[in-house]
Amino acid sequence: MPYEFDGATAVRADGAGRWSVDVAEGWDIRGNANGGYVMSLMAAAMRAEVERPDPVSITVHYLAPLVPGPASIATEVVKRGRRLATVTASLVHGGRETARAIAAFGEVGGSLEHAPFEHIGISPPDLPSPEECRRRSPTEGGVPLALMDRLDLRLHPDDTGFVTGSPPGRAEARGWFAFADGRPVDALSVLLACDAFPPPLFNLIGVPGWVPTIELTVHLRARPSGGPLRCRFVTDAMRGGTFVEDGAVWDGDGTLVAMSRQVGLIAG
Amino acid sequence: MPYEFDGATAVRADGAGRWSVDVAEGWDIRGNANGGYVMSLMAAAMRAEVERPDPVSITVHYLAPLVPGPASIATEVVKRGRRLATVTASLVHGGRETARAIAAFGEVGGSLEHAPFEHIGISPPDLPSPEECRRRSPTEGGVPLALMDRLDLRLHPDDTGFVTGSPPGRAEARGWFAFADGRPVDALSVLLACDAFPPPLFNLIGVPGWVPTIELTVHLRARPSGGPLRCRFVTDAMRGGTFVEDGAVWDGDGTLVAMSRQVGLIAG
């Protein structure tokens, strides 16, 4: 019995640099495929193309909303190097390009050669146990978030004020990420975790409406040893109708597994 | 009498989606064109292609070292939207692709419509005056940094320890960015500022050798009103032979004009 996320990110080779995918039902926010899911799907195709396991750097530009159904991904290998392979991807659905990506895949972590050069200058967020956190609901605040049926995403109780119209006044969202069906977390699912939390700005100004991602970049720093993932997202820059959101994701052993940054639009 | 940077980033239309450029002498680190300069050059071509002023998001993947001489940039418009135009660029020199970029151009700042939604959660670094800071030398630490003849880049006195083999033990580099010939700072030069400082990790572990950038992303947040630019770079994640470096750039009025993040390789 396969896990839902594996089915939703399956890619089938369809000729050189062509991949058939099915944008799955139920991985959406307000009916549009979640940006982290879109990144995971494109990463699955790029990873299959270059046959390297880890997205050391991956950037997606979101061009149009994406709805469920059959789609295709075109990949282009830019460079196959010794350490890294650089690759682009274009996701087309119904004749329209909905996302464009570029990534460098390789192997993260583990090089003894560089072991002396290890430094982590940030700490995982202090979180109550998952049981003491609040699970995000697929009907949170009256907004349809089907994605939250697929995930077991639990917010720090201090970061849920936006749901009831009482934002705490800090642009922060912290919590635990896991799959609802118990699928173990891996490199691909870390990408999903980087866009599954509420925009931290909701906890500063309330929910201004639709806040689509323009571009999301994730740097995988280590493969997660296990979950749930401990996550923190903040917005330190909001101005002129756009915002920057930074994320850090830690695994069950307290290892920093990813850093993310996105720029988004306050579309109202 | 044109400023040096304008000459070094001049692009000439050479057919649809084709641009001729000259990779200029003197904008290098150890003989290879600086990554910020490469980003500026590619941004100049992309900006000319889409005719939008500001890089709201720009990502460059560095594929090979780049030396001075004639080169070409191929641009492809991915999408022309109302607010943003998404565009890619490929820089080829001597028959070899040396960098691939993707960017979203638009107009930053200034929308009164979104004025209530303004929040900056980080502060500019506290710096002594430029006169009290230490100018980066083109022969710093015995390494040829021709770029430092083009710039007037001044480091916080507490962040220069790496030069003499006495790193202060913090992965931080702060200072002022200006051009040596007095050219005013603008959106394009902010991209250069994001890769002109010493890698902050030099101040933690000393100079481990060559630390090439794999990928650099810059989000322009506002056009600089004037200089010199007040900059801070930190590394909070170094492991397995790679590091993540975050930057924030502020203008003379104390406005946050850019945020940057790069992942680099400790190549030794």
Image: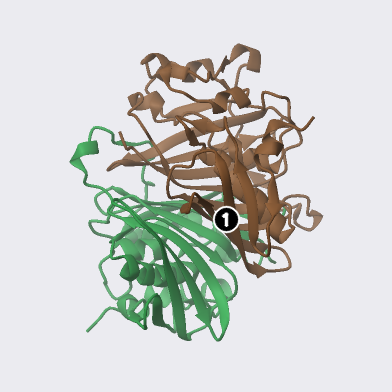
Chain colours: A brown, B green
Q: Indicate the position of residue B262 as horizontal and vertical percent values.
A: 53, 56
Q: Indicate the position of residue B20 as horizontal and vertical percent values.
A: 40, 83
Q: Is residue A222 visible?
A: yes
Which amino acid does the dot numbered 1 rest on? Asn
Residue at screen point 24% across, 59% down: B226
Which image quadrant is residue A132 in?
A: top right
Give me the chain letter of mark 1.
B
Residue at screen point 55% across, 60% down: B215
Q: Indicate the position of residue A188 as horizontal and vertical percent values.
A: 67, 43
Q: Foreground: B84 or B149?
A: B84
Q: Foreground: B180 or B24?
A: B24
Which image quadrant is residue A207 in?
A: top left
Label 1's element? helix
Q: How many marks?
A: 1
Q: With respect to residue B37, does A141 lie above or below? A: above
Q: Residue at label 1?
A: B203
Residue at screen point 67% across, 35% down: A5
B137 horizontally vs B171: left or right:
left
Q: Indicate the position of residue B38 as horizontal and vertical percent values.
A: 46, 71
